[in-house]
């Protein structure tokens, strides 16, 4: 399942879930070594371990605008579409703030308005500082 979406995945806004990320960024993610080495073969359950290793968030960096591991994991979540319970556990995780942000970002991309109100509004009370790349 290299760069293909899970066949059982539901479409988002009438299109392939990976199309939420722009084509240029998608192609840079597919060419990134982190994507090829670390994200290959990840499932919804093993994604948690990689998410706990995050130490910053961001989109791209550097002169050639390389994608961050955060964006690679967002793309993997769009590919695999983890169960809602798993994403909610990401958001409820108080120990790892970047896991929490990863879950919140995924809900923001794929969720409904009700999901955003239910799961994202409580995050306004989290005042921990985040490192951005």
Image (cartoon, rainbow, N blue to C red):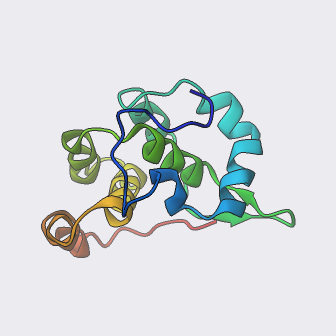
* Frontmost residue, 53 versus 72: 72
Residue 84: % across, % down: 22, 45
Residue 12: % across, % down: 37, 57
Residue 59: % across, % down: 61, 64
Reply above or below: 98 against 36. below
- Residue 54 in view (yes/no): no
Asked whether, in this view, residue 129 is left or right of residue 103, the answer is right
Reply above or below: 16 against 121. above
* Frontmost residue, 93 versus 17: 17
Residue 89: % across, % down: 22, 44
Residue under the image location 47 percent in, 41 percent down = 79
Residue under the image location 22 percent in, 66 percent down = 112
Asked whether, in this view, residue 35 is left or right of residue 103, the answer is right
- Residue 118 in view (yes/no): yes
* Frontmost residue, 58 versus 31: 31
Residue under the image location 27 percent in, 69 percent down = 126
Q: Quadrant of residue 83?
A: top left
Reply above or below: 38 against 110. above
* Frontmost residue, 106 versus 99: 106
Quarter of the picture holding the C terminus: bottom right
Farthest residue, direction top: 41
């Amino acid at each position: 399942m290299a760069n293909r979406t899970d066949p059982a995945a539901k479409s988002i806004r009438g299109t392939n879930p990976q199309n939420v990320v722009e084509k240029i960024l998608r192609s840079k993610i597919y060419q990134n070594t982190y994507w090829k080495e670390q994200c290959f073969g990840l499932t919804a359950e093993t994604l948690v371990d990689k998410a706990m290793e995050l130490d910053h968030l961001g989109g791209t960096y550097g002169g050639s605008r390389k994608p961050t591991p955060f964006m690679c994991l967002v793309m993997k979540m769009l590919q695999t579409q983890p169960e809602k319970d798993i994403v909610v556990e990401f958001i409820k995780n108080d120990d790892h703030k970047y896991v929490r942000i990863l879950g919140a970002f995924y809900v923001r991309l794929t969720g409904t308005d009700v999901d955003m109100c239910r799961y994202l509004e409580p995050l306004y009370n989290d005042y921990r500082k985040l490192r951005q790349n």
